[in-house]
Image: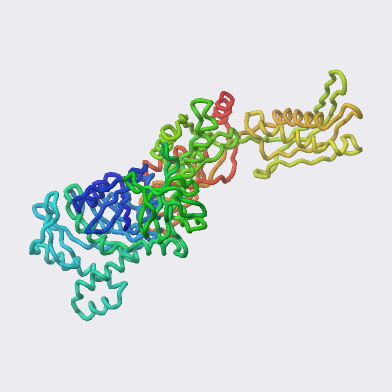
């Protein structure tokens, strides 16, 4: 079995294309719906195929690498509009990183919005691989009615809902066909010395040899062939499928890309299903994957066939199945018989950028939510779960709103846990602006042993980022040495919540003097005195609110970089500059400092300004002081919460 992934932007016609490909032999395919992936198993000319239809949308574009983990080849479906080429940029970036052979299908040619050569040129801006036209359109009365194959030099006329019919080459297209074919052969000759010799000597290359060169260069990903059609009318679909049959490599090439060696299978997708539990979609890379056999160091309970209730006893190389009762298997892993190795970095896609605190609607589901989120994170490598600092609540990061809705639906439908999603608050802190000397006496007498501790403290600010510093200059044993650590512990306790309601940072506390009682003094008494003394000093030392500022790296198509300066400025950020991404043609890395409170707005603004193609990575950089009404508002809201 060979496996292809059909991907592309929303409204590019991917689903219709997969449907047409799967019905070319006249037999209905077996379809397995698995979240944002739909897998169709079908036959073509007696050979077994599987096509993965990826949901469109920018969020899923950043998750495309997972499907390519199992793919022999990719079909990138694009709209016939040069202005929309940027929407394909994230897919081209992932395909290039994965090294997956790719064929481009310019769909909806029944209603083109630009010349084919302009569409290809616009796409070429986002990949270092050479894009080459393998067909040119035949036009009549402004409509595309067929296509000319540039290798065979045959003309085909489209028929509604049927395969195309061979016709005589239209005279009007003859000159354009020669020009386009010459460009194709020139590109192909850059990677084939023999073809280059023939062209230099003005010899006509044999068609069979040209097809063989095209096959090799496509499999080596040095060229990306471009085909034309309109899937909704079945136009160009047969030609695309024949190209896939001839040029898509077998599973042995995929095994080599994933490291070869003793790899038996790859896990590329996973779901939690009612009554079945964890289901992991795997593809066999070599012989030896069998029900009850060992994979990844443990037994595989069962192997279910795609789109059917029947199971597999064993998988031939290239076969795809759903592993059940095998909780040790996960997506994003390459398995040998005894071990599991993480798949290459490109398969994990972009880091999730949209964060939400999830709290159960019913308190009784608190423990169930933790278990459900752990299982959800196992099956979805594009999602991350951690505890929010401070509250300890579950903090989930996803690729965007659609991904979040999918995760919440899985929690509700798959685990029976209803949750509320809340926007997390930034990690505000506070510090002080001046030094204060404070004396505090703790005395308590309630029968029996009493409590007594007296401390003299100096509390002041330190350099930003230095944290907490404690010292003592006590003389004459006023505070016994064994009680001094308790004073420090009390000071640390006081910093947990300052006068403004937030943790206090960048403070120095010095114990300068004190008194003790031979009977009533204790570690507890001095810890209490240290805590209360520092607490009172902080309120007098000019408390200042600090907001976290993150260093943000925005991965963005170059055409949108110019708009980022005003966008970052509108969010009260500081632009640091941008550089061309050396590994990704047509992409920039835009760097800025941005208040953490603005990152929620950044996600929405980036989606709007770049049609969802850009994403960002944020890491804490420093704290900066915040004054005035905004600081008052934040403190009041925090106190009310």
Q: Is residue 557 visible?
A: no
* Residue at horizontal 68 percent and vertical 45 percent from the top: 466
Q: Looking at the picture, tell me which residue is in the foreground, 499 or 37.
A: 37
**273 is higher (above) or lower (below) than 207:** above
Q: Is residue 489 left or right of residue 184?
A: right
Give residue 384's position: percent from left, percent from top. 50, 43
* Residue at horizontal 28 percent and vertical 56 percent from the top: 48
Residue 316, picture quadrant: bottom left
Q: Looking at the picture, tell me which residue is in the foreground, 601 or 37.
A: 37
Q: Is residue 57 visible?
A: yes
**514 is higher (above) or lower (below) than 163:** above
Give residue 102's position: percent from left, percent from top. 31, 59
Residue 404, picture quadrant: top left
Residue farthest to the top? Answer: 446
Give residue 125's position: percent from left, percent from top. 33, 58
* Residue at horizontal 31 percent and vertical 68 percent from the top: 217
Q: How many marks?
A: 0
Give residue 608's position: percent from left, percent from top. 36, 41
Q: Looking at the picture, tell me which residue is in the foreground, 4 or 61.
A: 4
* Residue at horizontal 51 percent and vertical 30 percent from the top: 359
**206 is higher (above) or lower (below) than 362:** below
Q: Is residue 612 left or right of residue 439?
A: left
Q: Is residue 505 left or right of residue 111?
A: right
For the C terminus, give its image quadrant: top right
């Amino acid at each position: 079995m060979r496996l292809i992934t059909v991907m592309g932007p929303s409204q590019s016609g991917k689903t219709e294309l997969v449907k047409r490909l799967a019905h070319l032999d006249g037999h209905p395919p077996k379809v397995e719906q698995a979240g944002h992936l739909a897998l169709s198993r079908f036959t073509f000319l007696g050979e077994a195929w599987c096509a993965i239809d990826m949901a469109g949308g920018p969020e899923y574009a950043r998750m495309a690498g997972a499907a390519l983990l199992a793919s022999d080849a990719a079909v990138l479906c694009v709209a016939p509009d040069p202005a929309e080429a940027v929407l394909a940029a994230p897919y081209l970036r992932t395909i290039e990183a994965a090294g997956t052979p790719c064929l481009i299908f310019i769909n909806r040619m029944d209603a083109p919005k630009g010349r084919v050569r302009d569409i290809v040129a616009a796409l070429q801006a986002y990949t270092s691989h050479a894009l080459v036209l393998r067909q040119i359109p035949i036009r009549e009365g402004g409509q595309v009615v067929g296509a000319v194959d540039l290798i065979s030099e045959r003309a085909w006329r489209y028929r509604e809902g049927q395969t195309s019919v061979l016709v005589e080459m239209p005279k009007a297209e003859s000159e354009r066909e020669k020009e386009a074919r010459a460009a194709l052969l020139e590109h192909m000759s850059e990677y084939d010395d023999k073809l280059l010799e023939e062209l230099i000597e003005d010899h006509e290359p044999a068609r069979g040899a040209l097809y063989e060169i095209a096959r090799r260069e496509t499999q080596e990903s040095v060229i990306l062939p471009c085909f034309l059609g309109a899937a909704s009318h079945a136009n160009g679909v047969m030609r695309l499928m024949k190209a896939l049959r001839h040029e898509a490599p077998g599973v042995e090439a995929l095994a080599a890309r994933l490291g070869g060696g003793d790899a038996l299978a790859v896990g590329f997708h996973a779901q939690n299903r009612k009554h079945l539990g964890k289901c992991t979609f795997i593809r066999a890379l070599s012989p030896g994957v069998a029900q009850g056999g060992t994979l990844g160091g443990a037994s595989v309970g069962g192997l279910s066939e795609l789109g059917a209730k029947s199971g597999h006893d064993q998988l031939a190389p290239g076969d795809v199945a759903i592993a059940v009762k095998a909780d040790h298997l996960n997506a994003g892993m390459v398995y040998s018989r005894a071990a599991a190795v993480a798949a290459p970095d490109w398969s994990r896609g972009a880091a999730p950028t949209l964060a939400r605190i999830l709290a159960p609607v019913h308190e009784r589901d608190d423990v169930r939510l933790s278990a459900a989120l752990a299982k959800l994170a196992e099956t979805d490598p594009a999602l991350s779960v951690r505890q929010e600092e401070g509250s300890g609540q579950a903090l989930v990061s996803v690729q965007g709103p659609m991904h979040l809705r999918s995760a919440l639906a899985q929690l509700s439908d798959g685990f029976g846990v209803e949750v509320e999603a809340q926007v997390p608050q930034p990690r505000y802190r506070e510090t002080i602006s001046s030094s204060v000397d404070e004396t505090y006496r703790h005395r308590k007498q309630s029968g029996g042993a009493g409590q007594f501790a007296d401390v003299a403290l100096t509390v002041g600010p330190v350099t930003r980022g230095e944290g907490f510093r404690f010292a003592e200059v006590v003389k004459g044993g006023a505070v016994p040495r064994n009680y001094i650590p308790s004073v420090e512990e009390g000071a640390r306790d006081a910093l947990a919540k300052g006068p403004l309601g937030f943790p206090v940072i960048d403070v120095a506390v010095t114990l300068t003097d004190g008194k003790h009682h031979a009977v009533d003094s204790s570690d507890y008494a001095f810890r209490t005195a240290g805590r209360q003394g520092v607490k009172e000093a902080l309120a007098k030392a000019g408390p200042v609110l600090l907001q976290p500022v993150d260093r943000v790296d925005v991965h963005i198509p170059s055409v949108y970089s110019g708009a980022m300066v005003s966008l970052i400025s509108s969010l009260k950020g500081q632009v640091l500059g941008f550089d061309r991404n050396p590994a990704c043609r047509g992409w920039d890395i835009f760097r800025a400092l941005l208040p953490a409170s603005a990152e929620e707005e950044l996600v929405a603004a980036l989606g709007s300004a770049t049609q969802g193609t850009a994403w960002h990575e944020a890491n804490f950089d420093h704290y900066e002081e915040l004054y005035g009404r905004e600081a008052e508002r934040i403190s009041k809201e925090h106190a009310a919460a």
